[in-house]
Each structure stands twice: as C-alpha cells, then as structure tokens.
Image (tube, rainbow, N blue to C red):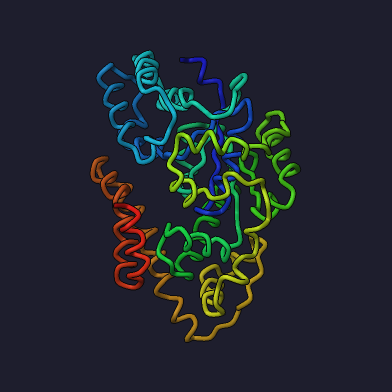
Amino acid sequence: MKRLDKIPFFFIVGRPRSGTTLLRSLFDAHPNVQIPIECKFILDLYPKYGRKKHWGHKDILEFYDDLLKQLRFDTWTISHEKLRRDLLKCAGDSPYSRICKVVYYNYQSFFPKDKMLMFGDKNPGYTIYTRRLHEVFPGSKFIHIVRDYRDNYVSVKDVDFELPIPSMVAYKWRLFYRSFERFRKEYPDLCRVIRYEDLTADPERETMELCRFLGIDYYPEVLNYYKKKDEILKVYPKEFITRYHANLGNQVNQSRVEIWKNKLTRMEIVLADIGAGKTSETAGYQRQYRGANPLFHLMASPGILIAITLAFLTRIVDTFPYKARMAILNRGPLVVTKTFLRIFNPKKYREIRDRMK
C-alpha cells in the first residue's frame, strides 16, 4: 500500500449548493481520478488518528469501526471486507494520509477507471479547513467553486440545508470565501478559483483548464457523466437523488444561473446583499443594495450574528474530545434547523418530518 503515497490528492471546496457536486460528477467520470461521494471522515477522524505514525492491528480495527460510523459513509459503494483487509496491510509505520488513501482506493465508482493518477474529495465543509488538509496531504491542490450568494441562498432554502435566513446564509458565504482567499494567498500555486456561472457557460473550457491545473489529461467524455443516472438510481433511493442531486441526470446547463431574480423578494435581496457585503464585488458579483439604511441593517443583524456565533462554536467544538465532537457535528445542525422550522415554518417542518418517517 506504500505505492499509494505517490498518488496526489486534490479537494473541491465551496459553499453547499454552489456546484461542488457538479464538479465532483465531472471528475468522477475521469478515467484517472478516484473521487467518492462526500464523507468528511478525513477531518472527523483526524483528532483521534491524524498524528498517529505507528498502527497496531487494534488501531487499524478501531479506525475501521469508527469509519463505518461516519455520516454518509454508508452511501459509498465499497467492499467492506476488502477494505478491512487492505487497511490491516498498513499495520506498522504508516502516516494517516496513507490510511485515508487506502479507503479512497477501495471506493467503487460507477465509471470505468484506467491507471489511477489522483485521488479527489469534494466537501463544502472542507473550505474552512484547508490548512489542516494541507498538513495531512502536503502539496495537495484545491479547487474552490464560487456561486452568486443569492442563487446560493435560493438553492440552500429549497433543500433545507441551513436556516432559511438570507443575511445568515450570505454572511456564511462571505466567511467561506474569505477563509479560502487567505489560504490561496499563502499557497497560490496549489489553488484555483472557478465560478459556477463560468463552468455552466463553457463546461468544456473550464474543465479542461482544471485538468491542466491538476496535471492530468482532459477527456471530453467526462461531460457525459449524466448518462450514468440510471445505474446510480439502482443503488441510491430516488428520493435522495431527486431532493439533493436533482440535476444529476442533466447535462451541464445554465438553468440555475440568476434564479434569485425571480425567486427572491426585494427584502430578501437587500438582506443577502448586506450579509455578503463588499466581498460580493471581490468575488465578481454586483450587489443591488449598497446603502446604509439603519433599519435594513438592523433586520440583517440577527442572521449575521447567528453566522458569527456558529463559526465561533465550530472552532470551540473542534477542541472537544472525539466522541463529543462527533455527536455534536452529526446531530447539531439537524436539531437547530428542525427547531427553527418548527417555530417559524411549521408547514415545512411537517413536510420534512413526514419524509423522514
């Protein structure tokens, strides 16, 4: 398994509902890239195993058991028995990065693979942890996909990913963007920023540029990723695909660009513009509202305060022991969202509750 050490890693990051899944689908169709469905076990298991250099059989089996408990790992098409055997081959002196790569190596893609040249991972939550990922995988590359914060809010609201508060979602967009920009200034050669709007306008050119950045050949057939939908539906529930990856069976298109113009009210746009602030222009998006109306800013402040508080609590939770941290991360966001909806949007709460029965 030491041969896996030579295979480089890259990460796709960005806000949820910004096109990270689209990029992951494009690279999943690449014959030389292994990029599983998102499961942020690298970060979640890092506090417990990240600095381990020597692994006994007991350590490997404990890691394996913890891995199986990770959120969304059950969605991976993978032979658990083969994974277990391959992990046990790493007993002895092995860096955490090698252990992780064994897991990625065992993932079974729906697309045929030739020589494995890169491992990839897509996860919005990684955006604020780029330095830690760089520590685990030195030299790894990062692709940050950015989407108009107002379209992002519409999409987030449609799938109940976060609290439906425009200023909060836009401010989190701002925090994510700034966090990655700080990392990019420090490691410019390892980072590439792409806009969702540019990717959907010219997917071939943008994907070709990303392949060049990663140092791999471009294959036009990656744009045919959508033709695997029927095979994927045989494995995953249709409701899961329809709700979270509705465009999986569609070609890259611009149907979701500037949807905010018809989907948001004037006040929602104002609150989102306040939340994004001047960072919107830095990222290439023009605000409609740039005023200083005290009432509007007062209305935006609760959402912004929630975003700041959540960012602060995330840093605090990162210091907790492994079990406590995982319990909070796996259940906390869902509990907060359901509580908010139960109070402020009972109809939506009942819809979610009925779907989960």
User: Is residue 93 at all visible to an observer of this figure?
Assistant: no
Residue 314 position (above or below residue 94): below
Q: In percent of the image, x 28 and y 50: which residue is there?
A: 328
Q: In percent of the image, x 43 and y 42: which residue is there?
A: 237
User: Is residue 232 at all visible to an observer of this figure?
Assistant: yes
Residue 47 position (above or below residue 4): below
Residue 29 position (above or below residue 147): above
Task: Left or right? Give the position of 213 relative to 19.
Answer: right
Expressed as whole percent of the image width and height from the top left, the position of residue 197 reads 67, 55
Q: In percent of the image, x 31 and y 21: which residue is there?
A: 60
Task: Left or right? Give the position of 84 relative to 213.
Answer: left
Q: How many marks?
A: 0
Expressed as whole percent of the image width and height from the top left, the position of residue 130 reads 49, 43
Identify which residue, 269 or 25, lies in the foreground: 25
Residue 210 position (above or below residue 18): above
Expressed as whole percent of the image width and height from the top left, the position of residue 198 reads 70, 53
Identify which residue, 280 or 152, lies in the foreground: 152
Task: Left or right? Give the position of 46 relative to 266.
Answer: left
Could you say which quadrant of the image residue 311 lies in? bottom left
Identify which residue, 154 or 142, lies in the foreground: 154
Expressed as whole percent of the image width and height from the top left, the position of residue 127 reads 50, 48
Q: In percent of the image, x 26 and y 26: which residue is there?
A: 62
